[in-house]
Amino acid sequence: GESVGLHLPTLSVQEGDNSIINCAYSNSASDYFIWYKQESGKGPQFIIDIRSNMDKRQGQRVTVLLNKTVKHLSLQIAATQPGDSAVYFCAENLNTGNQFYFGTGTSLTVIP
Amino acid sequence: DAGVIQSPRHEVTEMGQEVTLRCKPISGHDYLFWYRQTMMRGLELLIYFNNNVPIDDSGMPEDRFSAKMPNASFSTLKIQPSEPRDSAVYFCASSATWGGPQLFFGEGSRLTVL
């Protein structure tokens, strides 16, 4: 499959600060993207998604930005909390049978 | 909604033994996926099914790996014989065509092969 890579393997932020996690994807045909959060010992959980016809989508404290020109995806977490500490994955979908390819993940640590 | 259910949560076995991992997808979901997660390679798609039929098994590493889905509510991933390099966390996920391609993951089965 196509590779999906993350720029920063680890990220530490102070509680209350904003966090930005980045992801580069390589397949320009990908049309759907998801950010997942994985806490220790658990499976990945859906955070937010975005389709390729959008460049920004907001959820509760999270925003995903999509730049198709440079094939870049980012996840912004506002007012980061200790409960946000986890590994975050981006995943891309080629609209070919619900198949997703995952990035390697970024570990976010929130310092109280 | 019980979510995706996997068993066992932890398995420790010796090299050469057969390992069977089990998954119950979310009721009504028509897609089921098996992923393997390691520190070195991250989340890798092994195989996925649509309506109980295997669609793409190109991610299955070797003939030692096999997966079945005898009905809409049950799937197995079998490794025979197991090797130490198979040690990983194996995740099952399901999704529904009607709900968009979003994947719902189970809690995973952590396999250690000694």
Image: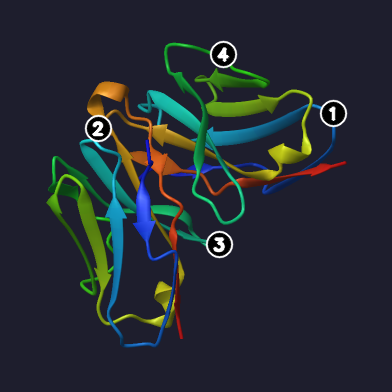
The answer to whether residue B107 is left or right of residue B77 is right
Query: How many numbered circles does the render carry?
Result: 4
Q: Where is residue A23 in the image (x, y as percent from the top left)?
A: 58, 35
Q: Which disc number belongs to residue A16?
A: 1
Relative to A11, residue A20 above or below: above
Q: In which quarter of the image is the N terminus of chain B?
A: top left
Distance from Cα at disc 3 to Cα at disc 1: 29 Å
Q: How far apart are marks 4 and 3 (CA)?
A: 31 Å
Q: State the residue at coordinates (13%, 40%).
A: B51
Q: Earlier in the sequence, mark 1 or mark 4?
A: 1
Query: Tag 1: residue type?
Result: Gly
- Position of residue A21 measured from the top left corner of the image (x, y, whole percent): 67, 34
| Residue carrying label 4 | A56
* Residue B8 rendering spot, x and y as whole percentages: 39, 66
Q: Depth-wise, is mark 1 or mark 4 nearer the camera?
A: 1
* Discs 2 and 3 carry the same chain letter: no
What's the residue type where badge 4 is placed?
Lys
